[in-house]
Amino acid sequence: MTFRKYLVLAGITVFSTAGDSLLARGMKELGGFSLHNLSGLLLAILNPWVTAGIILLLAFFACYMSALSWADLTYVLPATSLGYVLVALVAHFGFHEVISLTRWLGIALIAAGVGSVAAGPSLTPSHQRQHSRHVSRDTVSQEVES
Amino acid sequence: MNEIYAWAAIGVIILASTTGDVLLSYSMKRVGHVGELWKRRGALAVIGRVLATPTFPLGLMAMGIAFYSLLFGLSWGNLSLVVPASASLTFVANAVAARIFLHERVGRRRWIAALLVAGGVVLMAI
């Protein structure tokens, strides 16, 4: 794993969390939507919060696709859950919100899960991939499972 | 009755988002290391190659179905049921699907991680 790859994984966490938050804030500003009022959903793009949220979610998707091109799905997915932890930490240290004991326990479980995956190899060999010329040249695939 | 609808929506969300993740992961493995491709051929080649992979639009479609099922699910069930139930079960379903369809070697380390993260997501949401 190179530093750049960790940056991509961090991008997944940060962009998805920030994108979701901006989108949620924009949608709240616009009020509720019903399925009978679908034209309102199209106009929602004009709201600056929604626009910014969509741009960040596109950045998330680019990072996610990039990570999936060099790492297993079961390696990348736990990184997406770190967003929950990030939101809670920002709420606690940034906005001084009180976090309940169950939520701290949840944070600990997610962090332990991510740590458990991150300590292992990012890509495990499979039958199909041994024929792939791109991956076989990648040093990550040569990492040995500990 | 709404509770049954909510759980049906949760089932569809799990199925669709797992299908989507597996298809997208499969597509990107076929595209190959994006960073290296970018360096050798440029950004347009990367985008062209991703879009030319037939499983990619299928994966996007499945993700779209998952997103709209979430919207429907939220109209039938509580936020505190639908979001943690679908998110945490999707982590477990993905580990199973990645092992079966993507032939990933899901060792003890990754099973434990899937269960820890699934449990953590539930705890954070209640």
Image (cartoon, grey):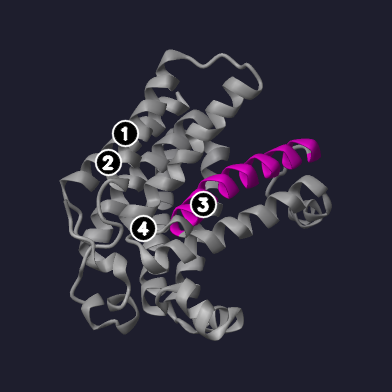
Relative image position of residue A88 (x, y in whole percent): 53, 27
> Marks 2 and 1: CB-CB under 8 Å?
yes
Q: Residues within 10 Å of mark 2 (few under 14, many from 20)?
A: many
Marked residue chain, label 1: A
Q: Which residue is at 51% across, 67% downward?
A: B60
Query: What residue did someone put label 2 on?
Result: A116
Q: CA distance from mark 4 to mark 3?
A: 16 Å
Q: Secondary structure at mark 2?
A: helix
Q: CA distance from mark 2 to mark 4?
A: 15 Å
Marked residue chain, label 3: A
- Residue B123, compared with residue A17, is above or below; it is above
Q: CA distance from mark 3 to mark 1?
A: 18 Å
Q: Residues within 10 Å of mark 1 (few under 14, many from 20)?
A: some
Three-letter amino acid code of the residue under disc 2: Ser
Marked residue chain, label 2: A
Q: CA distance from mark 1 to mark 4?
A: 19 Å
Relative image position of residue B58 (x, y in whole percent): 46, 72
Q: Residue A12: give its label.
A: 3
Which residue range is magenta in the image?
A5-30
Describe residue A103's horizontal placement relative to residue A72 as left or right.
right
